[in-house]
Structure formats: C-alpha cells, structure tokens
Amino acid sequence: MRKCFALLSALLFSLAAHAGGDYLVVKTKQGRFEDVRDDLVNAIESRGIKINHFNHIADMLERTGKDLGATKRVYVKGEQVEFCKSDLSRAQMEADPGNMVFCPYIISVYTTPADPARVHVAYRRPLAPGAGEATRQALRNIDKLLAEIVAEAVQ
C-alpha cells in the first residue's frame, strides 16, 4: 500500500510540476507563505548564491490596482526572488552574448485568494529553441539548478 501511495504521489507531483506547460514549472506545498519563502531563500543561499532582489509583486498589484479601478485580488501574498549563479551565467553568455536575457533567474512564491494555505513556487524554464548546443547546455544547467532549488523549497 505504501509503494502504491508513493508512486501515486510521485505521479501527481510530476504532473503538478508541469501544469503550466513546458516553459513554466509550478510546485505547491501546504503551509504558511513565510515559511515556504524562507525555505526558498535558504535553498538558494545554501548553494553560496547571493540573492539580488525581492520583488513584492502582490503588494505592487494591490497598490496599482486601486489606481486602475481593478477590484480582483490576484494574490494574497506574492514575491519574486532574483539571483544569478556566476559560473552558470558566464557559461550562458560566453555561449552567446544575447543570452544575457536569461539572467537574473527568478523564482516566484505566492498564495491565491482561492486557497491561501497552498503556497505555489514557480519558475520560467530557460528555453532557447533553435539555439546552438553551447547555449542549450548552459540553459539545461540553469534549469537543473532551478528545479533543485524549487524541489528543496517545497519538500
């Protein structure tokens, strides 16, 4: 029974991870927003990576929504965490200087009014269809890093 439950859990977790399509990975965890955000920060910093900036997206939407006459609340809480990893960033830009557009990396963490106890952790996969092999390899390495960080944050 345990094996069946573990297999079913892994399948559902995998499906949830790709709910946004190939370009977007979203994973969820029941809990408090602050706890999951702190777990995300710890997962980044434990790799020796410095966080550049926190974008307070939910606050910005709340503030600007009033000026726009918007009444729909999109997030209860929501932030983006920006960072880069120097070796991966250098490899991507050495492969093609235009790859600067993939830096910084951003992972979002948010809750919605529909289910404020479910925290979503998401990132946009760095994809470059048609790019050269050096760019594709550099972006695969970044994607792997982002996936590991998010998995650690929601465990």
Image (spheres, rainbow, N blue to C red):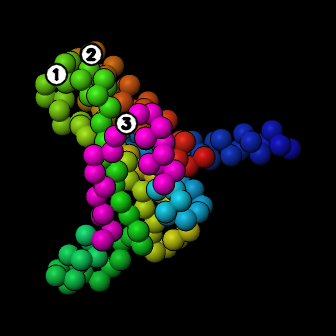
Q: Is residue 78 above or below residue 122?
A: below
Q: Nearer the viewer, mark 2 or mark 3?
A: 3
- Give left or right: position of 74 versus 63: right
Residue type at mark 2? Ala
- Is label 1 in contact with label 3 (beta carbons under 8 Å)? no
- Give left or right: position of 90 versus 10: left
The residue indicated by pointer 2 is 134
- Residue 101 is at least partly visible in this image: yes
The residue indicated by pointer 3 is 49
Read off the magenta span.
38-59
Q: Which labelled disc corresponds to residue 96?
A: 1
Q: Which labelled disc corresponds to residue 114?
A: none
Please provide percent x and percent y for residue 125: 35, 38
Q: Residue at x 49, y 63 (%)?
A: 34
Name the residue at the top extreme.
133
Q: CA distance from mark 2 to mark 3?
A: 23 Å
